[in-house]
């Protein structure tokens, strides 16, 4: 019996040698999954590389084919899930349409706004602060300042027009600022779009 056990252990191939014997069935399985010969070859290659790296975790005497198929299957489904989240853009057209507004633009625009805001007369700055930035209604701001509602509306309107002039803005200009208070003051003279 001891001789027979020794013969059985001698019949077992080294896992590295056995791995090579399964390449044909691995490729067939890969083709059945992805249906593209080139992708199947890449999948088999990646499977073999992963198996080779993890050969120490393979238990000799167990089913190597099943182990390799599991690695191949997991590799395929991981790549498939990953590709579902990615966009193929080999020529760079899609990437060219993407842009991120630089962080410093908002800071520069806010600096320009503060310089222009400081050039307004005190009454107009006060009116814009109360109505535009603080969100008070015209009649509330007028009451706080002790003036008529029409006077408050006039001050706010003149202040907004002067800011647009000082900042050299037109109706077509994009006013993407990082500060919402500044946006509220500058855009409140624009007509409201309802969708």
Image (cartoon, rainbow, N blue to C red):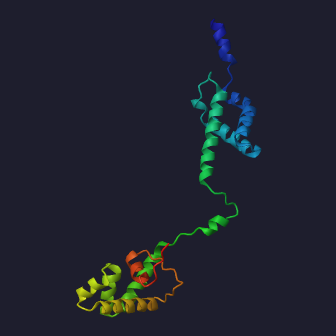
Which of the pair 20/147 is nearer the observer? 147
Taking the image as shown, residue 32 lies to the left or right of residue 142, namely right
Which residue extends farthest front? 195
Frontmost residue, 13 versus 168? 168
Residue under the image location 33 percent in, 88 percent down: 125
Residue 168 horizontal/vertical position (percent)? 49, 89
Give the quadrant of residue 34.
top right
Is residue 29 rendered to the left or right of residue 54?
right
Please give the name of the residue rendered at 51% of the width and 72% of the height, measured from the top-left corner. 101
Position of residue 42 relative to residue 56, above or below, is: below
> What is the x, y in percent for residue 187?
43, 81
Which of 33/127 is in front?
A: 127
Q: Using the rendered image of the protein, determine whether residue 52 is visible from the camera's viewpoint.
A: no
- Seen at 24% across and 89% down, the residue is 145
Provide residue 188's location: percent of width, then percent of height. 41, 82
Which residue: 53% across, 69% down? 100
Can residue 39 be seen here? The reply is yes
Tell me: residue 126, above or below residue 25.
Answer: below
Residue 142 coordinates in the image, percent (x, y): 27, 87
Asked if 24 appears above or below 94 in the picture, the reply is above
> Which quarter of the figure is the N terminus placed in?
top right
Image quadrant where residue 115 sits: bottom left
Q: Is residue 70 left or right of residue 171?
A: right
Query: Looking at the image, which is closer to me, 129 or 193?
Result: 193
Q: Which residue extends farthest top?
A: 1
């Amino acid at each position: 019996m001891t001789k027979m056990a020794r013969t059985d252990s001698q019949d077992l191939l080294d896992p590295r040698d056995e791995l090579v014997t399964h390449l044909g069935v691995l490729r067939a399985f890969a083709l059945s999954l992805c249906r593209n010969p080139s992708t199947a070859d890449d999948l088999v290659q990646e499977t073999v590389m992963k198996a080779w790296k993890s050969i120490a975790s393979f238990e000799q005497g167990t089913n190597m084919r099943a182990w390799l198929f599991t690695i191949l299957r997991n590799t395929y489904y991981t790549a498939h899930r990953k590709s579902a989240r990615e966009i193929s853009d080999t020529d760079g057209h899609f990437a060219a349409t993407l842009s991120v507004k630089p962080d410093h633009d908002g800071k520069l625009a806010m600096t320009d706004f503060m310089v222009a805001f400081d050039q307004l007369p005190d009454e107009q700055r006060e009116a814009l602060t109360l109505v535009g930035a603080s969100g008070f209604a015209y009649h509330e701001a007028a009451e706080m300042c002790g003036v008529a509602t029409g006077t408050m509306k006039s001050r706010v309107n003149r202040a907004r027009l002067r800011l647009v002039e000082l900042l050299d803005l037109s109706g077509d200009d994009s006013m993407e600022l990082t500060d919402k208070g500044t946006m509220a003051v500058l855009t409140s003279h624009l007509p409201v779009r309802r969708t």
